[in-house]
Amino acid sequence: MKYPVLLALILGCHVGVIAQVDRAPAYPLLTHDPYFSVWSFNDTIGNAPTRHWTGKEQPLMARAVVDGETWHLLGAPAPVYSTILPTAENAGHAGRKTHRKPAANWYLPDFKDQRWEQTQMPLSSEGGNWKEREVWTRQEFNWSGGDIHQLFLQLRHDDDADVYLNGVKIFSCAPCYNGGYEYIPITGAAQASLHAGRNVLAMHGVNTGGPGYLDAGIVDRLPAAAVQRAEQIGLKISATQTRYKFRCGPVHVDVNFLSPLLMKDLERLSSPVSYVTFSVVSTDGNKHDVELSLIASTDLTVNTPAQEVRAEQISIQQMLLLKAGTTSQSILRRKGDDVRIDWGYLYIGVPGGADVSQQIITPDGPARSTSVTGTSLALETTWKLHQVGNQNNHRVAVLAYDDIASVQYFGDNRPAYWKSSAATMEQRFPRWMAAYFGLRNASNDFDEELYTHARESGGEQYAKLCVMAYRQAIAAHKLTTSPEGELLFLSKENFSNGSINTVDVTYPSAPLFLIYNSKLMEGMLNGIFYYSESGKWTKPFAAHDLGTYPLANGQTYPEDMPVEESGNMIILTAAIVKDQQSGDYARKHWKTLTTWAEYLSKEGFDPANQLCTDDFAGHLARNANLSVKAIVALGAYGQMAGVLGDTVTSKQYLTLARDMAKRWMTMAADGDHYSLTFDKKGTWSQKYNLVWDKLLKLDLFPKEVYQTEVSYYLNKQNAFGLPLDGRRTYTKSDWIIWTATLADRQEDFEAFIKPIYKFATETPTRVPLCDWHETTDGKQVGFQARSVVGGYFIKMLEKKWLQMEEQARESH
């Protein structure tokens, strides 16, 4: 398509969107993978900077100038700080330390620390200058004086920490740690203690286990420039889109974020491309000149804002591009949980034309050059629309991220799936721009289809939960291939430990991908099968994970979950077999599945003291729900054997599983319900693993078991959901929906959904959906932005499989 034609279509197109949800804990904007994932954590997007899912600021901003009057639309600028004492991240600096407990006045400014050892900050066990359990450190610094606006302590600590400024305590926390620098206000006497000349920052750190880290700095937050904010008068989200509506005086401006995550087309799904569309219309009957600007911070390309970035302007095939990335380009050199990508390149592309321009913004203003190196740069695209009337005017920008190499897979750096052809990202931009109209229409159709099917399956509130979960579940994965060409769809265990391809994260995530493309489900299992079948993992049960994201070089989680992970792998393979109506995938891995089934036949029924997927709840012996998983997995193995024509093995394992189920009912019986463990009566827990007995039609447990548990649970609910078990009041929202799917009556299912929906729309914790929350007050306990919310789709999966079975009966 020629670009003048394309531009004309953009100018006149109607941007339709199927909007179904107007309230969520956080709002997805650019959502593709664990690194390219930008959200708004506020109901009003103009009130705060947009953020990476980890919470770190990654500002996207937009403004409209209407007849010379400026209106701020979205994403407040990041705060500006003046450094008084830099952190080690921003500049190397020295201090003194001791590992011996000092005198009680060690933190006072006049304490004599000459005998303490000189050291460079940060203090780090990995860096070698923190080798004991405790450390005390003092840093002297000179300040030239001046006006103070609002002081902040920049602190990174792992684990416990106490911090003093000139003898005044400004921070104390135990037991606790953080994964990165936090800004902690310094107020009152502590702020007043800062003075021109010599000052002292004193810290005490305790490493309670694992790596230790301690570093701090002091900054002054400068007053923000006054801006006129547009009135946000609309906010709607659907599965693939988030749409805002603003009033800017006599003009309305719509801003739509589209991430076309359509799972039938794997190349499209893998392409890290989002579209931001502006629609402008006059509301007062007059015509107005409007200037629109979209600004993206280069903080989208760094782990921390202090990292140096190179930005440049490019043109290709009548398109204008802005490109930015770190100067270091340390590809796949950073791993862990609370980290962001600092390699690869962010792109913003628009069709060229007389009304559009691009520029690079530095902290000192617009750059005169088309190539700039520095920190905290911004990429700005501006359109000038003349005489805007009562017909919508539209402009589209393409935002994309080329990570160059996505993950390391057993020593081999693997590119994203979309890179299977030779074209570079820059060469693909014209194609991606030309694809916009078709993708917009396909996404609208898909959004309506998903919402309709979800509502038919589980009701209105259930459908809204599925909409909230869709982009999050997909964007917690990366799609690539192995050196042998096998599909790999690798999850990151967001804010739970950063593992890659964790099996007990794959397990709850599975329903979404079984609904829309079971090849992705294969991609979630292939790496774990390879790990065993290559001989790299030699234990007779499935591994827990493949490493720490983005390095999939072998398990790094310190403890195995033998029954949990073996059961998960067998059950999910059986789910693939059922969905594909073919035993091919199971046949390919039958030897490994047999090893795991044999292990479960010996160790699964009455599990020893071990962790399960709910590892945050601690070790548990004789876990009745974990036993259910083993029983269902053995039945699923028998079912697959039957599909493969091995009737002897099928009968053997199905008989074994049915016998175990009968024993389970006796051993777990606890009056009007079934207990948490076989040996502790007067306890209870959600038996969410039973759902696969129902969905796979194994019929190992009588329906009365489901009904007994459902009836009991309905009387245990709190305001924000059903607790995970009787030990604590916290819960896992994905497991509640699995438990709810055991209900035969729709009203019972919806009774479980209502408190989860209340949590999702009323939680005070404004982050991407967390799946571990308190049922008493709706606050986050832990985890966020994880793929496990794909488990919300299990009720839809049940309906899909029931329809498949009905079609099969009709065809015969």
Image (tube, rainbow, N blue to C red):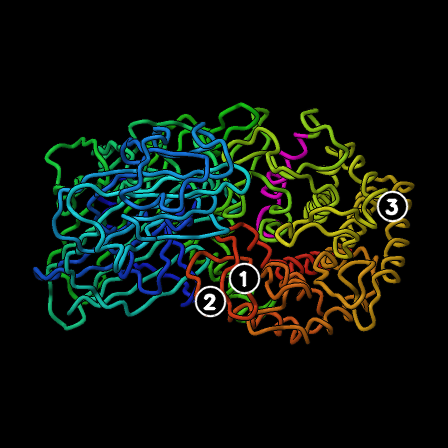
Residue 669 quadrant: bottom right
Rendered view: 409 above or below 460: above
- Foreground residue among 159 and 723: 159
Query: Which circle marks residue 763 in the picture?
Result: 2
Other residues around mark 2 within 10 Å, as few (<14) / some (14–19) / many (≥20) = many
**Which residue sits at x=59%, y=50%?**
509
Q: Which badge, 1 or 2, is on the more N-terminal residue?
A: 2
**Which residue sits at x=51%, y=57%?**
770
Residue 670 quadrant: bottom right
Instruction: Name the quarter where the N terminus is drawn.
Output: top left
Is residue 222 toward the left or the right of residue 744 in the image? left
- Foreground residue among 810 and 204: 204
Q: CA distance from mark 2 to mark 3?
A: 45 Å
Residue range in magenta is 514-531
Other residues around mark 3 within 10 Å, as few (<14) / some (14–19) / many (≥20) = many
Answer yes or no: do the residues labelled 1 and 2 have beta carbons within 8 Å? Answer: yes
Give the residue type at disc 1: His
**Which residue sits at x=30%, y=33%?**
325
Answer yes or no: do the residues labelled 3 and 1 have beta carbons within 8 Å? Answer: no
Give the structural element (helix, strand or loop) at label 3: helix
SS assignment for the magenta stretch, majority: helix
- Foreground residue among 812 and 304: 304
Instruction: Name the quarter where the C terminus is drawn.
Output: bottom right
Other residues around mark 1 within 10 Å, as few (<14) / some (14–19) / many (≥20) = many
Q: Does 793 lie within the magenta span?
A: no
Give the residue type at disc 3: Tyr
Give x and y (percent) for residue 146: 12, 49
Give x and y (percent) for residue 614: 64, 52
Give x and y (percent) for residue 282: 17, 67
Residue underneath mark 3: 653
Residue underneath mark 1: 773
